[in-house]
Each structure stands twice: as structure tokens, then as C-alpha cells.
Image (spheres, helix red, strand yellow):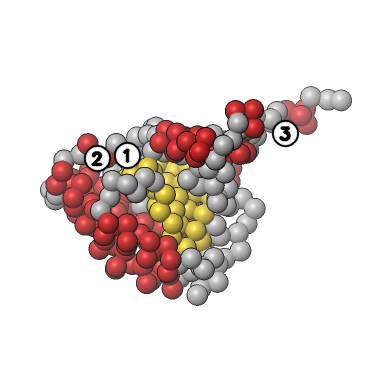
């Protein structure tokens, strides 16, 4: 296993990415959208290892939203097949590089074969600690909040007992800190129902770069933006306190 580079204070613990632009990347090259998704998998592997090298502890990526089922059936079918191929092609490398893989989202709609592949990926990387990769598949932020509420109700939590901390324990990413940095590629400037609960205080970075072209330069540019920002979490800016007098 490669030892991770020590994480400087300015590097986020948790990065979330909406991987957008695969289809447009393919269209620009007069290729079917599937080829864009295939290149997108390669970009994901590059980014996982680059984040690990820079000391990021958690990376969460939006691979397939609950709304993506509305896409053409041949594209959805191709994506499902690509996931299976990607697991078999890259899992050994990611596992060897110390990556722990988790899948977050509603698994009820996917095939048994896909669920088994995900379970294998999670089981075979369970003891890795270099970086935690969470792949959001058939995921939606609203779904996440609803399923957390349902779990709390099923557990017998009374309304007066339910606070933010307790509800958070039922969220899909309850094992991870909230994302410090939220990146969206592809030029769109919205979060598209991704991590609505967890991204409440994330620093947002939007880039025109299409996801298959995303590399270390684009990652470092986003990390540099993050490092220049002053995170306040609703508090008075420290510079304002410094100039306000006694």
C-alpha cells in the first residue's frame, strides 16, 4: 500500500463531486454517450488516487441519480453493464492502493448481479484506510432524508427525541464527516439533489471541465479555491471581529 501524503490543514477531509459531462464529451467526438461514461470511469480512478495522494480522507461521487432512470433505456442498460465491468477491471487496483469502497443509495431497483458486485467491492476493501470512496448510485438527496426519517420512525424515535445529530445517524453517509468541498464539473451551476443534507456548509466549486477530462490540474485548482476561502458556518467572519474593536 502507498503511504498517503500528510494532509495539510487547508486540504479538505471530505470532497464530493458531481461527475457531469460524459455525454457531451462523447458528442463532441461524434461517439455514442456510452464512450463518455467509459472515459468517466477512468477519470474517477485518476481522481480517487489523486485525492488520496493529497491527503483527502473521504471522496463521494455522484454516479447515478434516482432521476437518471428517465434516460433512454439503452443508455441506462449500458451504464449498468459498465458498472459491472468497472468493478472487475479496477477493484483489485483500488483495493491494492488502500481504497475502501462503499455504495450509497437505494439498491432495490438494481439487479441481483449488480448488488452482488457491490457487496463484493465493499467486503474486499473493508479494511482499507487510505481513502474512503463512496459511490452514490440510484441516490437522491431527498430520498436520503426520507429514508433516514423512516428509519428513525421504525426505531421508535419520538418526535421530541429527534434532533439533527440523531437524524444524521440514519443518513446514507452517517459514517463520514460532511463534505468540506463540493465540486461539479460540466459547466452546470446547481447541486442536482446531491447530498442536500450533508452539503449545507460545503464550499462549492463549479468548473466547465467535462468529467472525462478532469485530472490533477483541475483537482488542484479546486483545492486551491478551497484553501483561499474562509469557512464561517454561520459565524461572524474573523476579519470582521478583528476590526470591530472591543
- Give the vertical position of 200 relative to 42 (above or below): above
Residue 69 has which mark?
2
User: Is residue 200 visible in this depiction of the protein?
Assistant: yes
Please name whichever residue, 100 or 10, is drawn nearer the observer in this view of the structure.
100
* Label 3 crowd bin: few (<14), some (14–19), many (20+), radius 10 Å: few
Residue at the image position 50 percent from the left and 38 percent from the top? 154
Q: Residue lying farthest right? A: 246
Which residue is tagged 3? 238
Residue at the image position 64 percent from the left and 53 percent from the top? 9
Please name whichever residue, 232 or 141, is drawn nearer the observer in this view of the structure.
141
Which residue is tagged 1? 66
Q: CA distance from mark 2 to mark 1?
A: 6 Å
Residue at the image position 27 percent from the left and 40 percent from the top? 68
Which type of secondary structure does the marked residue at label 1 adopt? Answer: loop
Which type of secondary structure does the marked residue at label 2 adopt? Answer: helix
Q: Does the CB distance between marks 2 and 1 fall below 8 Å?
A: yes
* Chain-order first, disc 1 or disc 3: 1
Amino acid at each position: 500500500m502507498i503511504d498517503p501524503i500528510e494532509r495539510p490543514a487547508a486540504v479538505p477531509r471530505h470532497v464530493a463531486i458531481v461527475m457531469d459531462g460524459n455525454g457531451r464529451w462523447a458528442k463532441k467526438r461524434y461517439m455514442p454517450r456510452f464512450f463518455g461514461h467509459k472515459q468517466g470511469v477512468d477519470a474517477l480512478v485518476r481522481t480517487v488516487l489523486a485525492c488520496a495522494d493529497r491527503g483527502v480522507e473521504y471522496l463521494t461521487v455522484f454516479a447515478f441519480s434516482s432521476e437518471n432512470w428517465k434516460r433512454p433505456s439503452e443508455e441506462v442498460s449500458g451504464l449498468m453493464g459498465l458498472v459491472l465491468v468497472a468493478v472487475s477491471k479496477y477493484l483489485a487496483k483500488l483495493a491494492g492502493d488502500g481504497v475502501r469502497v462503499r455504495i450509497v443509495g437505494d439498491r432495490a431497483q438494481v439487479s441481483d448481479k449488480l448488488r452482488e458486485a457491490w457487496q463484493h467491492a465493499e467486503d474486499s476493501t473493508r479494511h482499507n484506510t487510505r481513502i474512503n470512496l463512496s459511490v452514490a448510485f440510484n441516490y437522491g438527496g431527498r430520498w436520503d432524508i426520507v429514508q433516514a426519517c423512516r428509519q428513525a420512525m421504525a426505531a421508535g424515535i419520538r418526535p421530541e427525541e429527534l434532533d439533527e445529530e440523531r437524524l444524521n445517524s440514519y443518513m446514507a453517509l452517517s459514517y463520514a464527516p460532511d463534505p468540506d468541498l463540493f465540486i461539479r464539473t460540466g459547466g452546470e451551476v446547481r447541486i442536482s439533489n446531491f447530498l442536500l443534507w450533508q452539503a449545507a456548509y460545503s464550499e462549492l466549486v463549479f468548473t466547465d471541465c467535462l468529467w472525462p477530462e478532469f485530472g490533477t490540474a483541475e483537482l488542484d485548482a479546486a483545492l486551491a479555491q478551497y484553501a483561499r476561502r474562509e469557512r464561517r458556518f454561520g459565524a461572524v467572519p474573523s476579519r470582521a471581529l478583528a476590526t470591530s474593536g472591543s
